[in-house]
Every structure is written in structure tokens, then in C-alpha cells.
Image (tube, grey):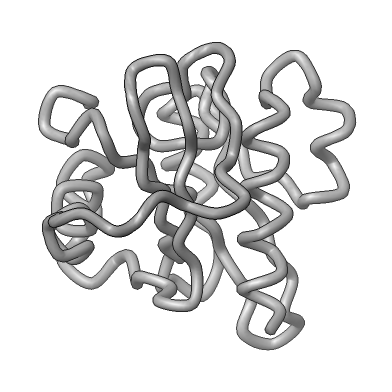
Amino acid sequence: MSSTFPTDMRLLLAHKQKTSARVRFLRFPHGVCAFTALPILSTVFEDPPSSRVENHPSVYLRSAEAALGLDNGGLALEAEFSASVDTPDGPIKVRLATFTSIDPPFELAERLGGKFIAITETRGEVNKISPAEMELLRQAYTALMG
């Protein structure tokens, strides 16, 4: 899956229930960043470096939908969230996308070897979610809940 997705970009994928506002994040076998894990020793920038030229996030969104087997419009970009991660290989931009379906696509998660988890479940996922990803989830949850 990662071959069609840029190496300097990651997505957090979440589902926010419209009626209850319950938020769940898609955890892959490697962690919560689609579609490849963050490198070891990654840290979230407190003050991201000055912006550089980058592709419009919708390009990444369409690639993610295709990689997941979703129809066009199956994911929506959450414009309020943008983070940068410092890695040994250089900075990585992280964006947040939400599934537009009424319910989380549990079958999709299962097919990918993952599952949907609430942010409160991340403590039990310490071996599967890095400290940098935990911070990204915290920031993403804050953005989603306003």
C-alpha cells in the first residue's frame, strides 16, 4: 500500500460518530499512521519548521481512498489538524482524515489487520503505538472535538 503514498506524508484515519461524537482511530498493525510506521526516534515538532512547498492534501486523500478500496469521498480531510514530525530521515507532515460513513468500516480495519480504537485504549497499545503517535492522537482528538 505504501508504494503509492508519499514517504514525507502520513495520515491519521479516524471515525467520528455523528450522533454521539464518539471518536475512534484506525490502528494498523504497525501503528496509527497510514500507511507506514513513523521511523524510530520520531518526535512531534512543538514549533513546526517554516512551511515548504507541498502538494494539496486532497492528492493524498484520493491516494488513501484508492489504497483502502474506498469510493471517492469515503474520506474527508480535517482542515483544523496539521502536524509535523521530526524524524532521522527529515520532517514528515501528518494530516487527519475522517471516514464519511455512518459507522466505522470495521471490515476494512479487519482486512488490514487493524482495528478501531478509542483514544482511551491507547494506553494498552504501548507496544503498538509510539510516543510520537500518542501525541499525534492527542492533538487530533483535540482538533476533532473542537
Residue 135: horizontal and vertical position, in percent?
A: 70, 44
For the C terminus, give its image quadrant: bottom right
| Residue 88 as seen in the image, left or right of residue 62 | right
Name the outermost residue toward the front: 50
Residue 115: horizontal and vertical position, in percent?
A: 61, 36
Q: Residue at x 62, y 50 (%)?
A: 46
Given residues 126 and 66, the one toward you in this image is: 126
| Residue 32 as seen in the image, left or right of residue 9 | right
Position of residue 37 relative to residue 119, above or below, is above
Residue 116: horizontal and vertical position, in percent?
A: 63, 45
Q: Residue at x 66, y 49 (%)?
A: 137
Residue 63: horizontal and vertical position, in percent?
A: 15, 48
Position of residue 17 relative to residue 105, above or below, is below
> In terms of image quadrants, where is residue 131?
top right
Given residues 96 and 102, the one toward you in this image is: 96
Q: Residue at x 29, y 41 (%)?
A: 9
